Image (cartoon, rainbow, N blue to C red):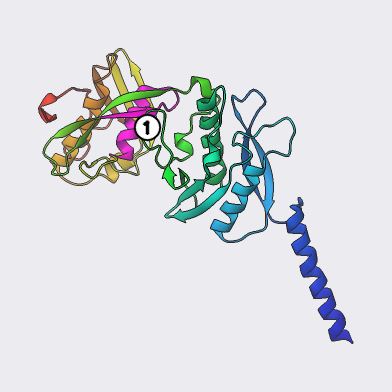
């Protein structure tokens, strides 16, 4: 009789736990952030949902389904159309590949701005899940493109522009970026249209150079672990302040160093307001990269550029 009673109690506990998760109560599951927008549709706001899943892909799928259902707070707004369906979601090496139905694209006035907010909503929501660093969005199996028709690519929180700024102020720019060709002979000029980070053309250029080229025809010699501390231009000198990985993780060889320095310098001096570039590491001037001097500003060097 005691065994039967114990079995009944265990079953009741399991049922109670399942019901608790399905109701998404505050005492069950793990709380995850969902990003919606305010009434003015110029900034993101956070709501939380408790998710009773353990596998990262299951968590991500449930979080996206909750996001598509919209906000619980009546003062918040969804920016993804309500008839949008999540077709697929995979996670590969920290990148979430999210495939939505074609209903994802908003219609009517300010559609481009609303889609930008939707993009930010998805990226912020998924990147708050431990193990997801970037998000790549697909629409019916086709990678999402920007207003110029170029693939948006994998986005992380560092690529999101809404940090106290409105989506209307977040603009895209066509940038001239220099990458070494795959044989490391010359720097090749590449045009790329990208959204500005912190409304700074200079910072966006450095960010894109660290991120590397989109084509296998070109390479980057800048260590991918390099972090941008700050990028500021004063009196025509662009001060590029980078983390220590710029030096400690850099490949050996004077050729690689020269390409690193002049990829950055030649890209930044495409701007009318930049005449030279001063490198800083953790806020301080350093003597050398490994072989190349970094203690004084560098000016443009066209000898490295492919004609």
Is residue 255 covered in magenta?
Answer: no
Residue linked to disc 1 = 149
Q: Position of residue 265 (x, y in %)?
A: 23, 26
Q: Which residue is painted at 17% across and 43% down in the image?
A: 182
How packed is label 1: few (under 14 Cα within 10 Å), some, or many (20 or more)? few
- The part of the chain drawn in magenta is 191-213
Q: Image quarter for residue 235?
A: top left
Q: Position of residue 47 (x, y in %)?
A: 68, 39
Can residue 53 be seen here? The reply is yes
Q: Which residue is painted at 76% across and 50% down in the image?
A: 26
Badge 1 marks a residue whose secondary structure is loop
Q: Which residue is painted at 54% across and 23% down in the image?
A: 110
Q: Which residue is painted at 34% across and 18% down in the image?
A: 233
- Count every numbered label the image shows and give the total: 1
Q: Image quarter for residue 57?
A: bottom right
Q: Is residue 84 above or below residue 22?
A: above
Q: Is residue 29 above or below residue 156?
A: below
Q: Quadrant of the C terminus?
A: top left
Q: Residue furthest top?
A: 235
Left or right of 262? Residue 86 is right
Is residue 207 covered in magenta?
Answer: yes
Q: Residue furthest right?
A: 1
Front in this rendered view, residue 7 or 174: 174
Q: Position of residue 100 (x, y in %)?
A: 52, 45
Q: Is residue 29 above or below residue 78?
A: below
């Amino acid at each position: 009789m005691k065994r039967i009673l114990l079995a009944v109690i265990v079953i009741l506990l399991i049922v109670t736990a399942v019901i608790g998760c399905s109701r998404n109560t505050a005492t069950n599951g793990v709380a995850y952030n969902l990003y919606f927008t305010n009434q003015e549709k110029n900034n993101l706001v956070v709501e939380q949902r408790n998710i009773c899943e353990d596998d990262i892909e299951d968590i991500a799928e449930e979080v996206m389904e909750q996001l598509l259902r919209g906000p619980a707070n009546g003062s918040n707004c969804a920016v993804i159309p309500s008839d949008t369906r999540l077709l697929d979601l995979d996670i590969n090496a920290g990148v979430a590949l999210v495939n939505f139905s074609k209903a994802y694209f908003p219609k009517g006035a300010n559609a481009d701005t609303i889609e930008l907010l939707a993009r930010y909503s998805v990226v912020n929501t998924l990147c708050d899940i431990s193990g997801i660093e970037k998000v790549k969005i697909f629409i019916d199996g086709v990678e999402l493109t920007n207003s110029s028709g170029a693939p948006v690519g994998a986005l992380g929180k560092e690529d999101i522009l809404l940090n106290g700024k409105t989506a209307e102020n977040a603009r895209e720019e066509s940038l001239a970026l220099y990458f070494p060709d795959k044989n490391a002979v010359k720097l090749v000029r590449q045009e790329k249209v990208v959204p500005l980070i912190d409304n700074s053309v200079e910072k966006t250029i450095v960010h894109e150079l660290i991120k590397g080229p989109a084509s296998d025809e070109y390479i980057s010699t800048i260590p991918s672990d390099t972090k941008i501390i700050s990028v500021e231009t004063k009196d025509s000198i662009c001060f590029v302040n980078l983390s220590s990985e710029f030096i400690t993780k850099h490949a050996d060889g004077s050729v690689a160093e020269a390409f690193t320095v002049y990829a950055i310098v030649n890209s930044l001096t495409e701007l009318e307001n930049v005449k030279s570039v001063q490198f800083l590491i953790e806020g301080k001037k350093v003597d050398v990269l490994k072989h190349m001097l970094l203690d004084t500003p560098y000016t443009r060097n066209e000898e490295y550029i492919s004609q």
